[in-house]
Amino acid sequence: MELGLFTNITFQSIAVSAIGIFGFVVGALVYSRDIRRIDNLAFFLLAWSFSMWSLLLGVFESIDISSLEYLILISVYMFAALIPPAVMFFAMTLFVGGKTTFTPLKISFIVAPFALIAVLLFIPDFFFMDIKNNGTAAKEIIFGPGFIIFATYVFLYITASIVLLFKKFKRSAGVFRTEILYVLLSIFIGALFILFVNIAFPYVDIYSLFWVGPLAGIFVLCTIAYLVIKYNFWNLKLAATDLFTSLISLTLLFELTLSNSLTDFIIKILILALVLISGLFLVRSVRHEIDSREEVEKLAKDLAKVNNNLHILDKQKSIFVATSAHHLRDPLTAIKGYASMTLEGSFGKLSKDSKEAMDRILKSSQRLVVIINDFMDIEKIESGEMDYVFSKVDLKKMIKDMVVEMTPIAKDSGLELKFNFDDTKEYRVNADEGKIRQVVSNLVDNAIKYTPHGSVCISLTKQSDGKEITLKIFDTGIGMKQDTIKKIFHKFSRADEASKFHTGGSGLGLYVAKEILKKHNGRIWAESPGLGEGSAFYLELKSM
Ligand code: ADP
């Protein structure tokens, strides 16, 4: 095909030039994602040098004017010589963000060899001796002695870039590692094709495959662009909006030149102005959206970091509480033991006053043991380290034993302790016996604590379908307001009236009880008709 100066247009030459233009668009698209990033700039320079090389290669193959031909060939090789340092620049800056500093040494390493090649290209008969157009799709180039310098230059730069990328790959982790690996592989494959087909082949007189290099190059560019876009989808949206607005504006601008009257021209100008203004707003809003999203992402990352630190602190706190509680318990056991022995008269007879004082020491130390145990339980519950050993538990027997143990305590407080159950029925559950005993004992203890006079009654009932067993502990004590009932299963929650009545509570027992019941797939709740009207606590467990 012939078109003006272009007397030798072939499918290959058009394709190669088109690839050049496409390469430029790809480069611009990636660059416009975030022009602050130096690796995006490096990619753009790479895409630009490649696109100019490819475009000019297509032009060179299509044109047939000897004076121009030589000049275009020099430009083709000039841009080809720009590609290796651009690859190097890209490899150096990939993922370093916007804060790279380029020392004069680094810059001269990239620029100096290129400058040398650029000068050598103009020496007649050094790189190229002759161009022959033998009527085929590709022209024959007779290379001079300097061509080997060019080939070595390309080879060394590409090898150095690949080595650099490989080092980065080894040092990086996660998503960056994957991305660098793909970049490395695509550059390696692309470079292999270009080195063979566009440098080695022409040297041994095979010219017809000149189009393979641009094809391999565009493959590399598209792979890198895809990776960049894949890992940052939102900025692609911005790039697409930019491109879309620019395309419409360019079309409208072109339309302007085709106006056939002044009115037509004015209308088109107005439309163009409207499109430009709304396009500007559109781009701004997308940019705003991206900025807010980035902000949210950053905040989420910060939050995750803070959360992580809190977890570490929480763990340290747990260790601290657990060890302190442990250290407190040992001396307390000794105090409790000696107080009890002294009361029993093991160290001689005590006066009435001493007996009373010793009794207080014993009771206070017993209360402290309960509080410390609650603390240790909470730490275990919250760190998920509370161990449960499930087995068949006979609730009837367990409570009978407990009543025997606690009757003297109830009697000391002037209370009657009763236990109602149906002797013909079995009350067996699958439970951790120690833990359920702890819960029930805490409920009975509370009932005794918060009942100034009257009785405490425990009852065991089995539902008619036999699936659930309910344990009820009710007293004639101080009772609770409805508001209090809602709060008492929370940590450190105590009713005011309870604190007035009994000062030594921690407000932890019911919280621990609720957590233990949860692990048994059971329920615990409280009821009371009101202050001064007594309370009832219920436990519900699955029957075996
Ligand atoms: P503590 O008894 O050490 O305060 P608990 O967690 O066992 O801690 O109980 C929490 C609160 O529930 C008590 O402070 C009290 O206000 C209320 N409470 C528990 N049992 C009774 C009860 N039998 N009668 C009235 N109030 C009770």
Image: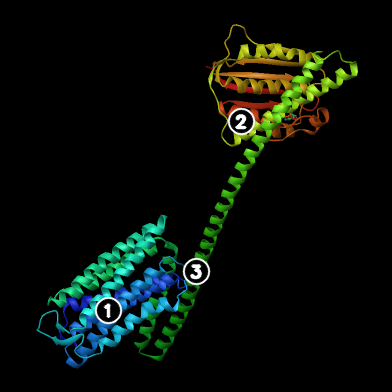
Amino acid type shown at disc 2: Glu
408 or 475: nearer the viewer: 408
In which quadrant of the rendered view does residue 269 lie? Answer: bottom left
N-terminal-most mark, 3 or 2: 3
**Residue 287 tag number:** 3
Compared to 407, does 292 lie above or below? below
In the image: residue 188, left or right of residue 228: left
Q: Residues within 10 Å of mark 3 (few under 14, many from 20)?
A: some
- Taking the image as four quarters, which one is ligand 1 found in? top right
| Quadrant of res 374 | top right
Of 70 and 149, the residue lying toward us? 149
Q: Is residue 34 above or below residue 300?
A: below
For badge 1, the amino acid type reads Ala
The kind of secondary structure element at disc 1 is helix
Mark 1 is surrounded, within 10 Å at the Cα level, by few (under 14), some (14 to 19) or many (20 or more) other residues, namely many
The circle on residue 194 is none
Element carrying mark 3: helix
In what element is the residue under mark 2?
Answer: helix
Cα distance in 3D space between marks 3 and 1:
36 Å
Question: Residue 141 at what x, y percent from top left?
Answer: 15, 83
Residue 6 rendering spot, x and y as whole percentages: 19, 87
477 and 443: which is toward the camera: 443
Q: Cα distance, mark 1 to mark 2?
A: 73 Å
**Residue at image coords 26%, 80%:** 55
Q: Is mark 3 in CB contact (under 8 Å) with mark 1?
A: no
Residue type of the residue flagged with mark 3: Arg
Identify the residue shown where x is 49% and y is 70%. 99
Which mark, by number, is residue 515? 2
Residue 80's disc number: 1
Work out whether residue 537 can be spotted.
yes
Residue 418 horizontal side relative to residue 77, left or right: right
